[in-house]
Amino acid sequence: MLEILGQEIQRGDKFIKDYPVTDGQGNETLLPYYVIAGEQDGPVLCITSGVHGTEYPGIGANLKLYNDIQTKDLAGTIIGVPQCNFASFQAKQPFVNPIDGKNLNDTFPGCKDGTMTERLCHILVHEFAAKAQYHIDMHSGDSIEWLHPYAFYHINEQDLAVTEIARAMAKVYGLDYVSYTETAGAGATDKGNFYAAVSELGIPSIQPEIGGIGLIECKTKLLHYNGARNVLIHLGMLPGVKTENSSQQELSRFYRLKSDFDGIYHCFVRPGDRIEKGRHLATITDYHGQEIYKEFYAEEDCVILWVMSTFAARKGDNLMAIGVI
C-alpha cells in the first residue's frame, strides 16, 4: 500500500493539501502536494515543480494536471508537488529559498536535520519521489533566464537501464532538444540537482525546461502539461495518443558559460539560435562598456539553449547554456 507522509493512499483518492515544515530555528514554510490515485492499477509517477519559485510554467502545468485528471481515467497514482520551494514562490525570490539563502537545486538529496532548504530536499526525495517508480521535475528559466525548450536526463553509471528509461521519458516529453548530464564529466554537472539525486536511487527522472524570465504564458504552461501527459500515456497511465515532435534532436554535449567578472554582459545570440563553431557569443566589459574583460566564442557547432537576460553580470553568474550538435 502506498503511504505518503503517514497517510495510506486508497484507490480512487484525490486530494490536495499543505504539509507544514519547520527548521531548527523555528522558521516555517509549506509543501503543497497532491495525490491522484487512479481507479485502475498501474505505476506511481511523481511530478514536481517550483524547485525555483519564480519558474512559473511548470507550477501552472502541475496544478492543471491535478485539476484535469480524474481518478476514473487514471491507471496508477500521481504524486504531485506544485511548489517545492513555497517560500521562494511566495516571496517572488529567484533561485534561492529566502529563509536560508540556499538553492534547492544545488542541495539534493538534502539532510533531515539541516537548514530549511536541506530539510525540504530530504522530504522531497524520501517522502515523495522515492515513493514513485518514475519522476518528472518541471523547470523553466528563472526570472532572469530566457530559454528554448529542452529536457535533461541523468547518466546513472551504476544502472544504465535506469538511464535508458529516463532518456525515453525525456524524448517522449516532445521538446526540441534532449541532452544528458552527469555527476562528473566533460559536460555540465548535475551534482545537487533533484532529478540526478532521484536517478541515483534507481528511479528514472527527467528535468524538462520550458519558458522563463518570470512569465507564465499559456503556450509554455501547455508545453509542460502536454509533455507530462505524453509521459503518462507512455507509461500506460492515461489513455490517448502521444504528440510527436519530428524535429526533436539529441545533443552530444551540454555546457554553460560563466562570468569571471563583475561588469556588463553583452549577449549577441538568442535562445534557439543554431551557431557555427567560432561565432562570437558574448562579451563582458567594465561598467562603462569600455574595457573588455572577456569574450566568448562557440567551441563547436551548437544551439543556444538559454541566456541570462540581464545586462549586469556578477562574478560566478551562469551566462549561457549551450548544446553541442
Image (spheres, rainbow, N blue to C red):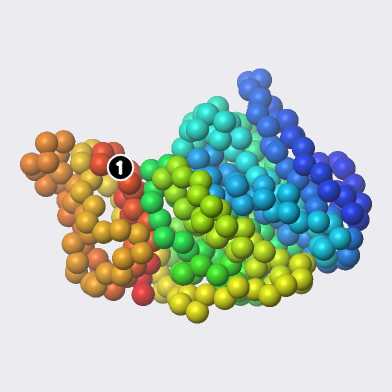
Residue 244 position, x and y percent, is 57, 76
Q: Residue furthest front?
A: 218
Residue, x 70% and y 38% (percent of image)? 32
Left or right of 194? Residue 295 is left
Quarter of the image that includes the C terminus: bottom left
Quarter of the view holding residue 199: bottom right
The residue sitting at the bottom extreme is 246
Per the image, the residue denoted by label 1 is: 310
Which three-letter amino acid code belongs to the residue tagged 1? Thr
Q: Where does residue 196 sit, x and y in percent of width and height?
A: 57, 57
- Mark 1 surroundings within 10 Å by alpha-carbon count, few (fewer than 14), some (14 through 19), many (20 or more): some
At horizontal 20% and vertical 41% (from top left) the residue drawn is 264
Left or right of 183 in this view: 256: left
Q: Is residue 231 left or right of residue 79?
A: left
Where residue 30 appears, as percent x and y from the top left, is: 68, 32
Q: Residue at x 67, y 50 (%)?
A: 64
Position of 271 relative to 142 (above/below) = below
